[in-house]
Image (cartoon, helix red, strand yellow):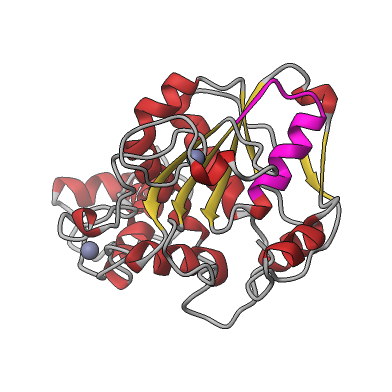
Amino acid sequence: MSRHARRVADCQRGIASHPLKIPAFFPDSPLPIRQVLRPELLRHGWSLLLDTLFPATCPLCRREMAQPNQICAACLPELPRQPENYCLRCGMATKGVQRGCGHCEQDPDFAADASYFAYCYEGQIAKWLVGMKFSDHSEWSRLLGWLAWQRLQRELTWESPDMLVPVPLHPYRLIARRYNQSALLARALAGWLNRPLQTNALHRIKRTQPQTHLNGIQRAVNLRGAFHARNTVVQGRSVLLVDDVFTTGATTQTAVRALKEAGAKRVAVTCLAAVQHGQAQDQENPFTDTPSFG
Ligand SMILES: [Zn+2]
Ligand SMILES: [Zn+2]
């Protein structure tokens, strides 16, 4: 037994009359100092400190929550849900559930086979999505994906797509924002739906202008040739195209057409929130002046 170990043993038996000094990183120390420095305990202590300094809160009302990434019971029912009766093709409100309506059947450019929207793009949902998009809150995507899944589980399970494809950002835009909010939502949905996420099926090859102040014709010109889909990935497959917000539908329908031109058998669209008919069209970014390249 080494001299140090003997002194430790004496001390533990209570027979040493002198104070025992234990070096902080002494390799043979049998005392709790090495247990205190165990990585898992350090990690636990660090997360405890973070929880104390930055407690988990509801992202909408800032009420303190037991776990991060949760919405409180008061805010959840306040989210503006999509109407119960809607057109299965374009997702717009109708008097009864139907496939095809005056909106999509009269639009020769409308290309989607089905559209599923979880919420109306207004109120807290709009504020929340703008926060995720422009204020660097990518961590909200999992919770928003879960909310979309809660609302659309039945429809998306029935749709049973071969793959989920997010509406892509132009590479310059992606570098500036650091993440594609639609891809984060699509990843969350793909996990719940247990279907593969394909981020290389559709590419944005043209840097389009902000669309907020463009009319319908200007949007169509702006988006012409904006997307390229890879036929080796989508040929003969059914695709669920995922976007965060559906406003006029110009971006989404251009992407749908690109996927179909590349041979996709069926393309359904799902968005977390949509502007319904009768809502102002200029709602792409109602809370900030930051331009949208959606
Ligand atoms: Zn809340
Ligand atoms: Zn319709």
- Image coordinates for residue 149, horizontal then vertical, percent: 38, 37
Residue shown at 31% from the left, 39% from the top: 85
Quarter-wise, where is residue 214 in the image? Answer: bottom right
Instruction: In this rendered view, identify the residue nearer to me: 108 or 63.
Output: 108
The answer to whether residue 72 is above or below residue 93 is below
Instruction: In this rendered view, identify the residue nearer to me: 213 or 6.
Output: 213
Is residue 25 something one can see in this rendering? no
- Image coordinates for residue 171, horizontal then vertical, percent: 80, 57
Is residue 63 something one can see in this rendering? yes
Q: Would you say residue 261 sits in the magenta stretch? A: yes
The segment highlighted magenta reads 252-267
- Image coordinates for residue 117, horizontal then vertical, percent: 43, 44
Residue shown at 46% from the left, 26% from the top: 193
Specify the farthest residue to the bottom.
289
Which quarter shows the N terminus?
Answer: top left
Q: Would you say residue 262 sits in the magenta stretch? A: yes
Q: How many marks?
A: 0
Which quarter shows the C terminus?
Answer: bottom right
- Image coordinates for residue 141, horizontal then vertical, percent: 47, 51
Specify the farthest residue to the top.
236
Residue shown at 35% from the left, 49% from the top: 41
Judged left or right of residue 144, residue 239 is right
Judged left or right of residue 156, residue 171 is right
Instruction: In this rendered view, identify the residue nearer to me: 81 or 147.
Output: 81
Quarter-wise, where is residue 222 in the image? Answer: bottom right
Q: Majority secondary structure of the magenta segment?
A: helix
